[in-house]
Image (cartoon, rainbow, N blue to C red):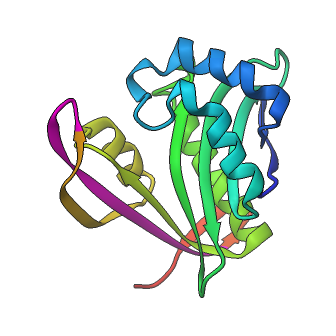
Amino acid sequence: MLDVNLIIDNMIISSIQKEDIPYVGNYFKSQCKSQNEELEISNIYEKFLEYYVSENEFFLKINDKETNDILGIIKGRVEFKNPHEAWIWSISLNQSIRSKGIGSIILKELSIYLKEEYGVRCFYTRIIKENSSKLNFWTKNGYEIIKVSKDIYKINDKKTNMFVLKKSIGRTNNGQIYAMEK
């Protein structure tokens, strides 16, 4: 388990603990009906165990600092290669904070945190299906498609593609991320 503790404005991003699982389940039931393919409600405890026993996984909750309500969930993994890389498997945000730039702020701050704390320089994600809003989110945040795997998943008896996206960062200065040279 990779421990993360980060404060951004009125949000606290921290590692999910065992006692958080019922609250995470309630979050998914109320907020993520369309995102169940990424983190199914019935498998939350299994996802927690995967992350808990792995020293490289992170499974994070985003809480409102005042109310402690869960505003979102992030799941990913850091690979200590040369250079170090992070895979962000899923970002799920509460409906009330979507499309307000908050996801981009969270992604930027998490990237800076992982760069400074763990030396991560390459960030990856994958999109399981052709979803223009997800693709737009990642590309507007500097990620580029590096691979398309055709018909790799079957969702509702229909084959769908998987996109792998990447962003490399260099140094940071006062919260500004500088892209690495290609």
Image spot of residue 60 (x, y percent) = 70, 41
User: Does residue 108 show up?
Assistant: yes
116 or 161: which is nearer to us? Answer: 161
- Asked if 131 appears above or below 20 in the picture, the reply is below
From the viewer's perspective, is 53 left or right of 38?
Answer: right
Residue lying at the far bottom in this picture: please name it.
82
The answer to whether residue 148 is magenta is no
**Residue pictured at 69% horizontal, 69% vertical:** 115
**Residue pictured at 80% horizontal, 51% vertical:** 4
Q: Quadrant of residue 106?
A: top right
- Asked if 47 appears above or below 4 in the picture, the reply is above
Image spot of residue 119 (x, y percent) = 71, 76
Quadrant in which the N terminus is drawn: bottom right
- Asked if 26 appears above or below 71 in the picture, the reply is above
Image spot of residue 7 (x, y percent) = 81, 41
Span shown in magenta: 155-171
- Asked if 39 appears above or below 28 in the picture, the reply is below
Image spot of residue 64 (x, y percent) = 76, 23
From the viewer's perspective, is 114 left or right of 14?
Answer: left
Residue lying at the far top in this picture: please name it.
30
